[in-house]
Amino acid sequence: MLQDLPAKSKPRYTIAMNAFPDLRLRRARRTPGIRALFDLEIPDPAKWCWPLFLVPGAGVKAEIASMPDQFHWSADRICEAVEPAVRQGVGSVLLFGQSDRPKDNGGSGAWDERGPVQQAVRALKRAFPQLTVMTDVCLCAYTSHGHCAPLRPDGALDNDAACACLAKVALSHAAAGADVVAPSAMMDGQVAAIRASLAEDGFDDTLLMAYSTKFASACYGPFRDAEGSAPTPPPGAPADRRGYQASPANPRAALLESALDEQEGADLLMVKPALFYTDMIAALKARTLLPVAAYNVSGEYAMLIATARAGWGDLRDLVRESALALTRAGADLIISYWANRYDELLA
Ligand SMILES: [Zn+2]
């Protein structure tokens, strides 16, 4: 015990811990230059991933009403969309899609090799070979009921049939040239099913980013508007996704989801949403040696936009502070709708 030592052998810090005026923490905050010596930095654009929304058709660039400054793009204009982000050094994009094929129970439009996502992957890899192209792998934008899995006749979700469908989607994206496939359906066994299918077809180098700890969140509203993927269940089917996405009130089960995805062969894990779940990012980072992505979702984006538009906060300050929150929590990759405005808001 320090207090038992003779006074002259006590280290100085035991005295200094409480000793104003000798100890003045403001010294290290006094100037921007001094603060910069000690502060964390906002990650380089290479550590950011920009999500984009593909729609069928040609010549389409249409602003998404619930996500200001984000657009629906047709595949023929995707390179035009992504070029400014590439110019700013943004390292990756994450593609979501819709199909012009009729929606069905299994979401078969999702693995159409002529679908907007598959076309966009091919175009982007041709135009920007160095850009890392990721694809969301799910069914909900393609199923007639909006769930992330086919429904059985009794209205229950068919988990194992979903895994087979998701594997087909992932294969179609890998075949188009996607560097990373990212299953988001939260079905049990989906990562193992996709990993096995990729291996069987020789896609050994395709990375698998699991939406491993994805919560049933109220922050997805603007995204569902953008993707047309809000559940519209028939009688007998679940009304929402709480039956498969992680409960915000059960952090242990949420972390177990990530642990299982790691065992099943994921290369990257993810926490989604991000800002409401920085404790989960930190907890997951402490438990895994895999990279951890944080998905800063549409509702979190919309909150900052709304605050700034109301004149209640400065957008650049808000965005930078939120980026630091994710960095402190330990995010290795930030998936965010701010990525394409990196130079304006984050540099
Ligand atoms: Zn889904």
Image (spheres, rainbow, N blue to C red):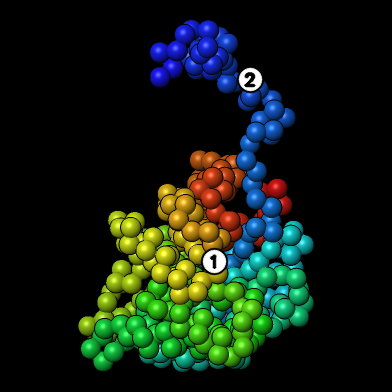
Q: Which residue is mark 1?
A: 268
The residue located at (54%, 62%) in the rendering is 290
Q: Name the spot of residue 137 as percent of width and height, x first.
A: 51, 78
Q: Is residue 46 above or below residue 16?
A: below
Tell me the kind of residue under disc 1: Leu
Amino acid type at image mark 2: Arg
Residue in the picture at 45% in, 83% down: 193
Whether residue 35 is visible here, answered yes or no, is yes
Q: Is residue 52 left or right of residue 256?
A: right
Q: Nearer the viewer, residue 21 or 307?
A: 21
Residue 339: x and y in percent read 63, 58
The one of 199 and 340 positioned closer to us in this rendering: 199
**Residue 75 visible in this rendered orientation of the protein:** no
> Which residue is situated farthest in the top direction here?
7
Q: Going from the N terminus, do you reach mark 2 or mark 1 first?
A: 2
Observer-nearest of 193 and 169? 193
Q: Residue drawn at (69%, 52%), measured in percent from left and top? A: 44
Label 1 SS: loop
Location of residue 196 in the rendering, given as x and y in whole percent from the top left corner: 50, 85
Query: Residue under circle 2?
Result: 27
Residue 143 location (% of width, % of height): 41, 85
- From what the image shows, is residue 180 above or below residue 39? below
